[in-house]
């Protein structure tokens, strides 16, 4: 590797501590990976913890080769914990890092960590982990590699403890660098731990470091290779003593952390987190014990010691979330690492980069889309030709210019922009100043809409720091001066020369450009490495010219899954395979806005062409991928539609109803700032439950059955929904005396209405109800004014009807979609307008869509007057597990990132960015309706808590989702079969018994069943009631099947 650059010499020193005990055979690979780092400001400290092997002999060779290596020995084995502490005590760096001696790191790991640390002034910087088994197979664990980009203050330790050991990337010490002043602050505490520790010692280090850190950040680079060794397996080779030692170490580690938290007065805050962490470790180790072939007496002793160490009483059964971090594994893609090693090769003197789609990208599906923006400028400065599209003329002129140039100058292989516009000046009857303005505008747009490709900028920066000479080589008609402005605007300012076909009149595509550059530089072509996005021009032709070459695919080719040797999913399949059950009409990707959105997605998610992509996935089992792409495009389309209509209607404020309006509210705030006169926004705390008392006193009590799913409720659960307005002396026996069975689910509308009569008479305190409804009116009237509108996901407009009735004046609303005709009926009846983003209802909606949009927070359950006479909402108790919180936060933040990126890019031309609502929603509908099971595992531990509708406080989102899509597939396949045979749907059931047909329709098509039964038993209420009861029993079986 070349000598370090002057730039590297000015950067901070990193002290890297490598403890060694009985891992000598892996030590050379570990040390080589550190010594060969692109970042050379390293102090490499090897600590021999009295290892029985020949550590000293191995290290002596490195001491002779590299002055950065230091060596220290323990006189006796002190354990991994103290070996790390010993190394840190002689460290002199500004940062400190740790590498286990049987692991190794990627070539550019520390450069990227330190650059991020310097830029963010971070105390801790974390990289990603690649696991490697004994056969050399390398893979990533998708869910253990979801890193938070940045944290500050108390959020750092809150996140650390709240994950409760679910994701080990948090607490292992070796995948991060730490500021030395942070480490030294914690060192006295570490030195107080005097026991020999080899298990869970990371927990001590990490707990204190995360508690004391002021800023944490992460990088996206896959950098630390964690080796899985047979010695760490759970087989019979682990004897009782090893188990007992491990358990003792765990107890020591947790006790130490608890003592530290008590001394720093933080224990109460994190007590429950640590308790859950210990329970999780208990369950994991119990599983390991069960997999061994110990004698029963030894196993019993081990279990007793494990319980003692972790202070566990009783037994804990293994939970699915304990293994969630390893639920999905993806083969590691090595080619980004390979290209870095090629750049670092001492034989390479020059690194050459293609420019467009390699160094820089544009937010256009097709480069010609930029000319559609030029069309608008043409009509502004030359309004006489309203039916002429200048972009068409411009492309025709380029084609004709190429033909003419080849005739006039056969040796010239390319044209330039000046020649194209000269042709326009001579052939079209436009004023010359108009043509000049158009050419200048095209150049301006080219500069404006190019941005750097971060993964290639990373390669460029690395090459610079390795003292490589850098050149840019491009086939492009733009003038060299414009190319210079483009690359330097993107941050590529340090280079030797730009070679562009418009000036050299030679193309890479023919190979002649490469020959020309070789002669111009007067160098051996084998000392050049060229990197580009066109396989033929940048790879094949470069190699034919004697250059080294590496292919970096276009971002859009990856999004479209166009590469034969690189899996990148089929997330765009709805643009190619439109499915009738979602929509009734479709025009393929014809709007500029949709194409620009797709390009923005590609440029973000496939910036690095060699990300590790799960082969059994379309969305890479990645919440950020789903959020940025599917949820981002849909939500930006939705909020753009809202703000443009709201501006037209001159609304004052749009109220986004909690909780489903949370994400749209956030995205609306990003988008609306780019529109003049956009209405203000407000997040309004309201819910169906908070409106229930109003229904009792507004002659709408029997409308309650359409507001709640009565068959999911019992009389007791309904009482809970009205807890704020019940009588203080409520006696449940009064209900039972009147035949109400409090714990029995309602079986009919009649039974529910009968219960309501009892509830209203014997249970409701009408004084409380009157006060409550007065509070509602005061609260809502103080917030929603007469020229405001609301947003909700949908569906029937019942809630909006109640709002209008309470307010006493109309308030229009925006929906994603409606359900059947009720929204039209309610809005007409109550004189307000409902506008829907979708004309049709998606086949799968409800719980999942709400979960994607909703706030991770408590629902409003009522309103009360505070001591300051201000009415404020009252909230329910709320809890969500860490996995759900991580997934939803990542999804929603990614959607907000997409809105920020897209709007920031096109802010000057928003009037040209037209969309079709359903078209920008296709990725989300594909994810909801047709995603693979691996991509759905993001919601494996997500639950809906809609107690009003479902009567339950924990409904599995994934189970519901799978049940809905399974039903849809069955209906779709049966419809296809019936169409193929020109027979009615479910024709195959006609030869089976009636009872079998009833069972089938109960499980898979309840609407058809209910319609058939209602028609057949019209006028036979008793028989209908018997059948209704039977139907509910069969539905219970269905829930068991799809549980």
Image (cartoon, grey):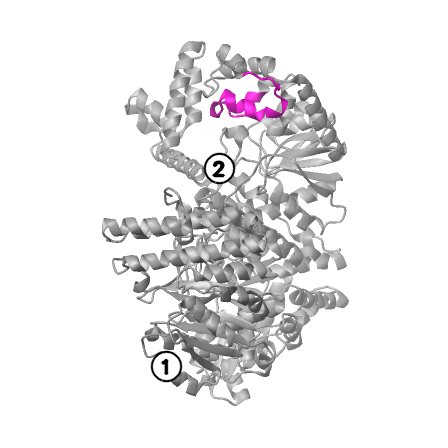
**Residue 309 appears in the rendering:** yes
Find out whether the residues at labels 1 and 2 contact each other: C-beta distance under 8 Å.
no
Q: Residue 195 carries which label?
A: none
Residue count near mark 1 (Cα–Cα under 10 Å), binned few <14, some 14–19, many ≥20: some
Element type at marker 2? Answer: loop
Say left or right for 634 vs 783: left
Q: Residue at x 59, y 69 (%)?
A: 181
- On-image quarter of the C terminus: top left
Q: Position of residue 1001 (x, y in %)?
A: 38, 26
Q: Which residue is drawn at 45% across and 65% down?
A: 194
Q: Name the residue under label 1.
A: 56
Say left or right for 301 vs 265: left
Q: Position of residue 930 (x, y in %)?
A: 44, 44
Tag nearer the camera, 1 or 2: 1
Task: Give the residues drawn in magenta, as a range.
Answer: 704-731
Whether the magenta-drawn stretch holds residue 665 is answered as: no
Whether the magenta-drawn stretch holds residue 710 is answered as: yes
Q: Which mark is residue 844?
A: 2
684 and 279: which one is in front? 279
Q: Determine which quarter of the picture holds residue 94.
A: bottom right
The residues bearing labels 1 and 2 have C-alpha atoms spaced at a distance of 65 Å
**Residue 281 appears in the rendering:** no
């Amino acid at each position: 590797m070349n000598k370090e650059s002057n730039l590297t010499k000015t950067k901070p020193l990193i002290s890297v501590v490598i403890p060694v005990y009985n891992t000598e055979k892996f030590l050379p690979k570990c040390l080589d990976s550190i010594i060969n780092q692109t970042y050379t400001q390293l102090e490499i400290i090897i600590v021999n913890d009295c290892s029985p092997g020949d550590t000293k002999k191995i290290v002596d060779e490195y001491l002779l080769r590299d002055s950065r290596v230091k060596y220290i020995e323990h006189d006796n084995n002190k354990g991994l914990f103290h070996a790390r502490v010993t190394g840190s005590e002689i460290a002199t760096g500004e940062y400190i890092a740790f590498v286990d001696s049987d692991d190794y790191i990627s070539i550019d790991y520390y450069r990227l960590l330190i650059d991020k640390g310097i830029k963010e002034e971070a105390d801790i910087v974390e990289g990603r982990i690649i696991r490697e088994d004994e056969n050399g197979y390398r893979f990533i664990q998708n869910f253990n590699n979801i890193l938070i980009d940045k944290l500050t203050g108390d959020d750092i330790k809150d996140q650390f403890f709240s994950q409760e050991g679910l994701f080990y990337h948090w607490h292992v010490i070796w995948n991060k660098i730490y500021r030395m002043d942070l480490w030294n602050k914690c060192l006295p505490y570490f030195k107080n731990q005097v026991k020999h520790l080899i298990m869970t010692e990371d927990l001590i280090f990490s707990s204190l470091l995360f508690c004391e850190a002021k800023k944490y950040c992460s990088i996206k680079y896959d950098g630390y290779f964690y080796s899985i060794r047979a010695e760490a397996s759970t087989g019979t080779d682990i004897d009782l003593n090893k188990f007992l030692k491990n358990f003792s170490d765990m107890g020591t580690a947790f006790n130490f952390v608890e003592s530290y938290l008590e001394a720093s007065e933080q224990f109460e805050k994190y007590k429950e987190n640590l308790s859950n962490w210990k329970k999780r470790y208990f369950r994991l180790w119990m599983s390991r014990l069960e997999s061994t072939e110990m004698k029963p007496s030894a196993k019993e002793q081990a279990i007793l010691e494990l319980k003692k160490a972790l202070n566990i009483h009783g037994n804990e059964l293994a939970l699915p979330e304990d293994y969630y971090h390893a639920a999905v594994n993806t083969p590691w893609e090595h080619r980004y690492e390979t290209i870095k090693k090629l750049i670092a090769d001492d034989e390479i003197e020059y690194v050459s980069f293609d420019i467009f789609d390699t160094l820089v990208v544009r937010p256009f599906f097709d480069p010609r889309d930029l000319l559609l923006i030029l069309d608008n400028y043409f009509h502004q400065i030359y309004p006489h030709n309203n039916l002429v599209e200048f972009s068409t003329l411009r492309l025709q002129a380029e084609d004709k210019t190429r033909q003419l140039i080849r005739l006039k100058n056969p040796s010239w292989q390319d044209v330039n922009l000046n020649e194209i516009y000269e042709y326009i000046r001579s052939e079209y009857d436009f004023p010359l100043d108009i043509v000049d303005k158009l050419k200048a505008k095209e150049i301006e747009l080219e500069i404006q809409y190019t941005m750097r490709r971060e993964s290639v900028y990373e390669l460029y920066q690395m090459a610079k720091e390795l003292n490589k000479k850098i050149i840019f080589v491009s086939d492009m008609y733009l003038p060299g001066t414009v190319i210079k402005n483009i690359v330097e605007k993107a941050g590529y300012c340090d280079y030797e020369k730009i070679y562009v076909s418009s000036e050299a009149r030679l193309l890479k595509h023919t190979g002649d450009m490469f020959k020309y550059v070789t002669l111009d530089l007067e160098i051996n072509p084998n000392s050049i490495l060229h990197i580009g996005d066109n396989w033929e021009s940048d790879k094949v032709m470069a190699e034919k010219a004697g250059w080294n070459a590496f292919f970096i695919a276009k971002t859009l080719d990856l999004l479209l899954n166009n590469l034969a040797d690189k899996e990148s999913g089929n997330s765009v399949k709805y643009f190619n395979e439109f499915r009738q059950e979602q929509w009734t009409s479709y025009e393929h990707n014809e709007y500029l806005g949709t194409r620009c959105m797709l390009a923005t997605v590609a440029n973000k998610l496939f910036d690095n062409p060699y990300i590790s992509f799960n082969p059994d996935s379309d969305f890479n089992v990645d919440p950020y991928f789903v959020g940025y792409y599917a949820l981002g495009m849909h939500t930006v389309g939705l909020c753009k539609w809202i703000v443009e209509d709201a501006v037209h209607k001159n609304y004052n404020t749009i109220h986004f109803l909690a909780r489903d309006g949370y994400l749209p509210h956030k995205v609306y705030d990003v988008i609306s700032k780019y529109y003049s006169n956009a209405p203000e926004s407000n997040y309004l705390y309201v819910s169906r439950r908070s409106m229930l008392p109003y229904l009792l006193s507004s002659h709408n009590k029997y409308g309650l059955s359409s507001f709640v799913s009565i068959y999911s409720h019992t009389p007791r659960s309904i009482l809970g929904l009205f807890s704020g307005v019940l009588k203080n002396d409520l006696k449940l026996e009064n209900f039972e005396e009147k035949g109400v069975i409090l714990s029995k689910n309602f079986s009919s509308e009649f039974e529910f209405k009968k219960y309501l009569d009892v509830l209203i008479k014997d249970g409701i305190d009408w004084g409380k109800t009157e006060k409550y409804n007065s509070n509602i009116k005061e609260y809502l009237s103080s917030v929603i004014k007469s020229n405001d509108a609301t947003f909700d996901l949908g569906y029937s407009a019942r809630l909006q009807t109640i709002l209008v009735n309470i307010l006493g004046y109309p308030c229009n609303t925006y929906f994603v979609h409606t359900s059947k005709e009720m929204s039209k009926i309610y809005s007409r009846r109550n004189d307000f307008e409902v506008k829907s983003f979708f004309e049709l209802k998606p086949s799968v909606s409800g719980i999942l869509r709400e979960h994607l949009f909703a706030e991770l927070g408590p629902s409003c359950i009522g309103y009360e007057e505070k001591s300051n006479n201000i009415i404020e909402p009252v909230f329910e108790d709320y809890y969500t597990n860490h996995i759900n919180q991580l997934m939803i936060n990542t999804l929603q933040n990614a959607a907000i990132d997409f809105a920020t990126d897209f709007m920031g890019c096109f802010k000057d031309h928003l009037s040209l960015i037209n969309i079709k609502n359903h078209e920008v929603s296709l990725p989300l509908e594909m994810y909801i309706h047709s995603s693979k099971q691996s991509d759905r595992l993001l919601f494996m531990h997500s639950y809906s808590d809609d107690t009003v509708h479902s009567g339950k406080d924990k409904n599995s989102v994934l189970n519901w989702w799978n049940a809905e899509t399974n039903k849809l597939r069955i209906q779709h396949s049966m419809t296809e079969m019936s169409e193929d045979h020109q027979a009615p749907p479910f024709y195959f059931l006609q030869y089976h018994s009636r009872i079998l047909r009833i069972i089938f329709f109960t499980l898979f098509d309840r609407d058809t069943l209910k319609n058939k039964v209602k028609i057949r038993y019209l006028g036979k209420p008793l028989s209908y009631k018997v059948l209704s009861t039977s139907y509910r029993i069969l539905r219970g079986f269905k829930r068991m099947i799809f549980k």
